Image: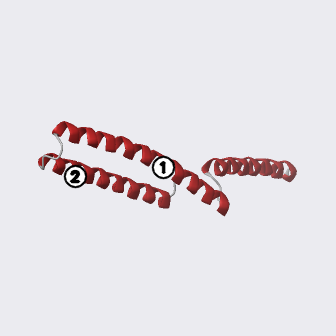
Amino acid sequence: MDDFSAKIMDNALNFAFMTKDTAEKIFGEFVKAGKVSKEEGQKLMEEFVKKFEAEAANLNHKMKAEIKKVIEEFGFVDAKKYEDLNARVTRLETYINELHKKFKD
């Protein structure tokens, strides 16, 4: 993952933690105000977390697909292809050096 993608993920995670903390505070205030029982507040929080995690997984999937699309549109080479090409160049260099030695002698 490149630096830009890592920053996006870090910011998304920070937002997720802020959102969860905010939700905990809100549900805690509902309990303090007597609008819901402690058990109901806990249940609401659990439901919120489940929905949040499902949405986060969906967003993560969409982000990966979009990043992959952008990479393909710009013609960037992925790490696997880069490694394959690098290995191929190394083999060709070795072969050329062997040919050079063979015909030099």
User: Regarding mark 1 in the picture, which secondary structure is present there?
Assistant: helix
Disc 1 residue type (three-letter): Asn
Q: Position of residue 50 (x, y in %)?
A: 36, 40
**How many numbered discs?**
2
Q: Position of residue 87 (x, y in %)?
A: 68, 47
Reading the chain from its start, which is encountered first: label 1 or label 2?
2
**Residue at x 16% of width, y 39% of height:** 38
Q: Nearer the viewer, residue 36 or 62?
A: 36
Q: Residue furthest front?
A: 35
**Residue at x 79% of width, y 51% of height:** 96
Is 85 left or right of 4, judged from the image as shown?
A: right
Is 103 left or right of 15, judged from the image as shown?
A: right
* Residue 60 marker: 1
Q: Residues within 10 Å of mark 2 (few under 14, many from 20)?
A: some
Q: Which residue is mark 2?
A: 26
**Residue at x 76% of width, y 50% of height:** 92
User: Regarding mark 2 in the picture, which secondary structure is present there?
Assistant: helix
Q: Position of residue 43 (x, y in %)?
A: 26, 38
Q: Nearer the viewer, residue 82 or 54?
A: 54
